[in-house]
Amino acid sequence: MTPAELSQAVQAAVSAAVEAGELAVAVPEHVTVERPKNRDHGDYATNVALQLAKSAGRPPRAVAEVLADRLRGITGVAKVDIAGPGFLNITLDTATAGALARTIVEAGEAYGRNQDLAGLNINLEFVSANPTGPIHIGGVRWAAVGDSLARVLRACGADVTTEYYLNDAGVQIGKFAASLQAAANGREVPEGGYVGEYIVDIAKTITEAVPGLLEKSEDEQLQLFRAEGLALMVAEIKRSMDEFGTHFDVWFSEKSLHDSGAVGTAIDRLREQGHVFEQDGAVWLRTTDFGDDKDRVLVKADGDTTYFAADAAYYLSKRDRGTEVALYMLGADHHGYVNRLKAIAACAGDDMNHNIEVRIGQFVKMLRDGEEVRMSKRAGNIITIDDVVEWIGVDAARYTLARSSTDSTITLDINILTSQTNENRVYYVQYAHSRMCAVQRNADEQGISRGAAEDFKPELLATEWESDLLGHLGEFPRVLASAGELREPHRVATYLEDLAAKYHRFYDNCRILPRGDEEVTDLTHARLWLADATRTVIANGLTLLGVSAPERM
C-alpha cells in the first residue's frame, strides 16, 4: 500500500463515517499521511481528526476514535493508535507493506509519476545568457536546475516548453562584434568589449571563412563580424548545452521581436489596458500600480525602445503561444526583475500570482585544494560550462548543482567531486544503484531469479531495515509531487541520498543471496524484489536530474 492509497483509504473512512451519521463534516478533498520519524508511532500518521474537530463540533480525540474504528477494518491495516491530542498512528501488516516492492517493479519507469499538474502549460525559460561568450558558472547552475525542473514538471503531468531567450539585439551584441573586429585587425579591444582566447578564436574562424574580409570597409567588417560571430557563438552555446544534457525546445530571438514589430504591438496592447503614459518625451508603463519600485520606460525620448519593452513583448509572445504559466529562472543579480516582470503580466491583464513566476538562483563558487578557482584560460575572466565538465564531468556537475536549493550559494569542491568516496554525493547515490545491479548479476550467475509475481511473499520482508527501506520507497511519489508543486528539483536529490543510505544499511544487515551451499529460499526471492524496487526508484530519480544510473562503477 502506497501513502497515496492509504490517504484515499482514510478519506474513504471519513466519507463512510459521514454517511453513517457518525460525523457531520465535509469530506476533505485530500488527506495528508506522513511517515513519522519515530517508528514507534507506526508506519504512517495523519492529523485528519484535528482538522475535522472544529467543524464536527467534537474533541479531536473523539473524532479520531470514530475514524480509528473504521480504519481498523481496512485490509492491510494491522493497528491504529490514537496519540496526543488526536493523531492517528497507522501500522500496516508486513504483507501489505512489503507488497509495495512488487508494485514498484511492475510500474517501472512510471513509478512516482502523477497527473497533479495535468492540463497546465508551462513555458520554462532558463540560462538565456547573452550570446557574447561561453556559458559561465552561474548559467551552468541554471542548465542543471532548469533541465531537471522541466523533467520533474513533465513527470507531474505538466505540458512544458523549455526555452532559451537569445539576447541577439542591442548594445552588447555591438560590443561583441567590435571586439571580434579589433582582434582580427590586431587592435586593442574597445572599452567595455569582450576579451579572452575565445574572441581571438572566433575572429580567426570568421576571417578564414570570409575571404577578403579585412579588406572591406570598417562598417562592412563590423556587420559581418556581428552576423557571423553571433551565429558561431550560438552554435557554441548549443553544443555546450547538448553535451551537458540540457535540451531546449525553443531558441527565441530577441531580434525577432523588433523585426516583426512585436515590440510596438505589445506597447499598443498595454496602452489599451490603460497602463501606458507619456512623460518627459518618453513612453512609460505604470508598473508601480502592481508593486514595482518605479515606473518603467518603454520608449526613450530619442525614440529608441528599451530592453524592458522587449521584455514586455516577450512575455506577451509566450502567452500568445498558449503558455499559462511563464516561469523565468534568473541569476542572483536579477532580483530587481521580479517585480517588474510580474508588473508586466498585471499590466497585460493577467494574474501576476499565477500566469508568471520568477525564480532567483544564488552564486556558485569552485574550489581546488582549498582555494577558490576564479579564472578560465579560454574566457579569460570566467569559469565556463566546458571548464566545469572537464574538471568534474557532466554527472557530478549536474547532480551537485541541482541537489541544493537555488536560494543558497553553493561551493563545488573539485577534489571531492572527482573522488570515489561518500563525500561525493553523486557517487554515493550512483554506487547504490550499481551495487543493486551487481546483486542482480550475481543472482544471474547463480541461476537465481526473483521469481514470478504470484510467488512473491512480501510478508517475509519484516526486519527493521526492510521496513525502513520500504517506507522510504513509498515516499517517492509524494516527494516528486512536492518537487513539482514547489518548483524545487533538489528535493529529489535529497530523497535519493536518504534512499541510498537506507539501502546500504539494508544491504549490510540483510543477506540477499545465499552463500556457498545455502539454499535459495522464499526470503531470497523477496529480497531480490526489494532490491530491484530500490534500483528502479533510484534510476527514476537520477533520470529526473539528468544524471546517469551506471550498472558498474
Image (cartoon, rainbow, N blue to C red):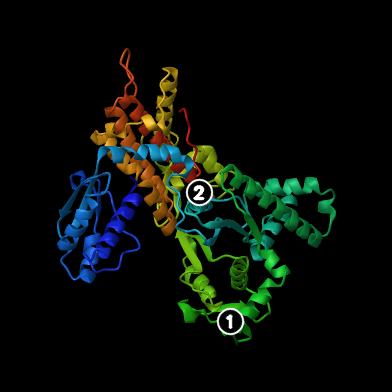
Q: Residue 543: where, in percent of width, then height?
A: 49, 42
Kind of residue sitting beneath label 2: Ala
Residue found at the very far front of the displayed protein: 20
Local packing at callout 2 (Cα closer than 10 Å; few below 14, some 14-19, many 20+) is many
Q: Could you tell whether 424 is left or right of 247 in the image?
A: left
Measuring 68% from the left and 76% from the top, which residue is drawn there? 264
Q: Residue 241: where, in percent of width, then height?
A: 59, 47
Local packing at callout 1 (Cα closer than 10 Å; few below 14, some 14-19, many 20+) is many
Image quarter for residue 159?
bottom right
Q: Tag 2 or tag 1, which sits nearer the N-term?
A: 2
Q: Residue 48: where, in percent of width, then height?
A: 25, 60
Q: Residue 242: where, in percent of width, then height?
A: 61, 45
Measuring 65% from the left and 60% from the top, which residue is drawn there? 252
Q: In which quarter of the image is the C terminus?
A: top left
Q: What element carries label 1?
A: strand
Measuring 47% from the left and 54% from the top, which residue is drawn there? 156
Q: From this viewpoint, is residue 414 visible? A: no
In the displayed structure, 155 sits above or below 502; it is: below
Q: In which quarter of the image is the N terminus?
A: top left
Q: Name the residue under label 1.
A: 284
Q: What element carries label 2?
A: helix
Q: From this viewpoint, is residue 401 visible? A: yes
Numbered mark located on residue 144 in the image: 2
Measuring 49% from the left and 74% from the top, which residue is drawn there? 351
